[in-house]
Amino acid sequence: MRDPIVDEVRKHRLDHTREFGGDLPAICADLRAIRSAAGPDVVRLAPRRLKPPAARQPRRRSPRN
């Protein structure tokens, strides 16, 4: 079974490669330009403190019959 999203990504990647004639440095430079034009994409969240684990209760064994 083919994934239509993967197929679309591959199609656009192939079109982009053809646009630059397979010149890898030119492709990379273009991708870097596209990425820098998009602006920052880094999200910085405040760190969360982990709660200490609850005190463990000893296991109770079920009585054997």
Image (cartoon, rainbow, N blue to C red):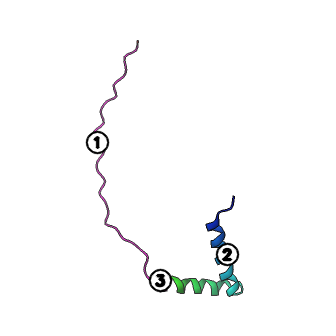
Callout 3: SS: helix
Q: Please tell me whether residue 65 is drawn above or below residue 1 in the rendered image.
A: above
**Tag 2–tag 3 contact (CB < 8 Å):** no
Q: Callout 1, which amino acid?
A: Ala
Q: Estimate the x, y position of residue 1 in percent, counting from the top left.
A: 69, 58
Label 3 environment density (alpha carbons within 10 Å; few <14, some 14–19, many ≥20): few
- Dot label at residue 38: 3
Q: Callout 2, which amino acid?
A: Lys
**Which comes before the other along the chain, label 2 or label 3?**
2
Instruction: Give the CA distance from mark 2 to mark 3.
Output: 22 Å
Instruction: Give the CA distance from mark 1 to mark 2.
Output: 52 Å
Q: Name the residue under label 1.
A: 54
Q: Which of 1 and 20 is in front in this view?
A: 1
As drawn, is 56 to the left or to the right of 29?
left
**Tag 1–tag 3 contact (CB < 8 Å):** no
At horizontal 29% and vertical 57% (from top left) the residue drawn is 49
As drawn, is 6 to the left or to the right of 40?
right
At horizontal 31% and vertical 66% (from top left) the residue drawn is 46
Callout 2: SS: helix
Q: Nearer the viewer, residue 34 or 55?
A: 34
When asked about the image quadrant of residue 58, the answer is: top left
Q: Please tell me whether residue 49 is drawn above or below residue 65 in the rendered image.
A: below
Q: Which of 42 and 16 is in front in this view?
A: 16
- Dot label at residue 11: 2
**Which comes before the other along the chain, label 1 or label 3?**
3
As drawn, is 10 to the left or to the right of 50?
right
Q: Give the range drawn in magenta.
A: 36-64
Per the picture, the main secondary structure of the magenta-coloured stretch is: loop
